[in-house]
Structures are given as C-alpha cells and as structure tokens.
Amino acid sequence: MKISKRLKTIASLVPDNTYVVDVGCDHGLLDIYLSLNNHYCIASDISKKCIEKVKENIKKYQVQDKVIPVCTDGITNIEIPENTCLILSGLGTKTIIDIINKCPLDNINSIIIQSNNELDILRFKMMKKFHLEDEISIYDKNIFYVVMKWAKGSITYNDKELYLGSILPIKKESKKYYQFLLEKNQNILSKIPSNHLEKKQLLEKQIKWLEETLKD
C-alpha cells in the first residue's frame, strides 16, 4: 500500500504494540497502513463524507477487524483504549490543544502531532504535561511539515527551543526546513512597517536563531 511521505513519517513514530486513535483521519489511509502493520486503530473524523470514504477503504483492504471508523468531533464519544498512541495530524494548533485538553490522558502513552501552524505555541502548550521524544522535518508535495512525537512528563523549553524545536536542530535534514523559514522571515521582515516595532524585533530574533542554527 502506497501512502504519502508525510503519513509514512507519522507511521514511523508509532510505537510497536500500541492501539492508535487517529483524530482527523481524512480517508483513513494512515490507519489502514498501520493496521496492515499489526496495529488496531480508531479512525475519527468530523466529516461524514470522510468517514464514508474510510469505510470504503477499510472494505477495499479487508481490515474490518482492525480499523473502527467513528464520525465525531475530536475524541467525543471515543473510549480511549489502554496503551494508546494518539495521532493529531493536518490540524491547526488551536484545534489540537482543544482536543488534548478534553482528552482523558490515563491510557495515552504517546502523542504524534503534525500541526499546520504556530509550532512555537504548540510546543509551549504541550510542555506543561509532555516532553518531546522526537521531531522530524520533511518536504512532501512542495510543502514542509514538522512531525512531533510527545511522551508524558513535563519539561521547560526556552524561547529558542520553542521556535526551532529541541531535537530538530541536531538533525542535518532540518537544514532545508530552516533555510525555508529564514527566507520566509526575511521576506516578511522586509515588508513590515517600521512602526510595528514589536513584530519586527521578534522576527529579527527568529532570523538570528535560524542563521546561528544553519551555521552549526
């Protein structure tokens, strides 16, 4: 079964012998891929059309006994099994944090997140209860993504780590992602009016961090 580089990266971070709860599953391809590799999954999405497609795909790949489709908002009406890996991908940071705040965490041993925005805010919110076990930057279909794996146990990251990540900077493959961020920030900075001092200073600080990281 072929899946995107983004989904394959997420799958690579799922621990062995865990149950998977995938919120915002879209067409369920990640869950089906995982089920073909000895995982049991709950595939959740708020869209009825998506869940109907999940059901079609489940039947196509004959994994009815391993993937349970659920049409719901977040984790509403989902009983989290013991030893669960929660997956939240393709969602915004605000939505992700709202879901985690409503989610009973007792049976969750890891959370894999791929957010579409505000990664520094996401790291700040997550570090109150979790710590990063891994981070991977990838380029897939002309878009950069950052996939994070979190485990229980709070930690404190400084502002630079919140922006760049605590693990990404030590990985050579992150250089292209940081170069993209640097050029993006430089472009934004050039267009900011001089009276927007606070935003300008923040961007200058982030640019400095990126330049330092790219030199290492």
Image (cartoon, grey):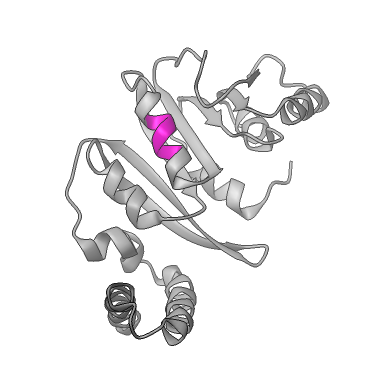
Residue reaching furthest front? 195
- With respect to residue 193, does 140 lie above or below? above
- With respect to residue 141, does 91 lie above or below? above
Q: Chief secondary structure of the magenta span?
A: helix
Q: Is residue 16 left or right of residue 123?
A: right
Q: Is residue 199 left or right of residue 2?
A: left
Q: Quadrant of residue 34?
A: top right
Quadrant in the picture for the N terminus: top right
Instruction: Give the percent coordinates (x, y) of residue 116.
Output: 52, 53
Instruction: Give the percent coordinates (x, y) of residue 105.
Output: 33, 23
Q: Residue at x 45, y 73 (%)?
A: 181
- With respect to residue 137, does 22 lie above or below? above
Instruction: Give the percent coordinates (x, y) of residue 138.
Output: 53, 61
Magenta extent: 96-100
- With respect to residue 91, does 177 lie above or below? below
Q: Residue at x 63, y 37 (%)?
A: 30
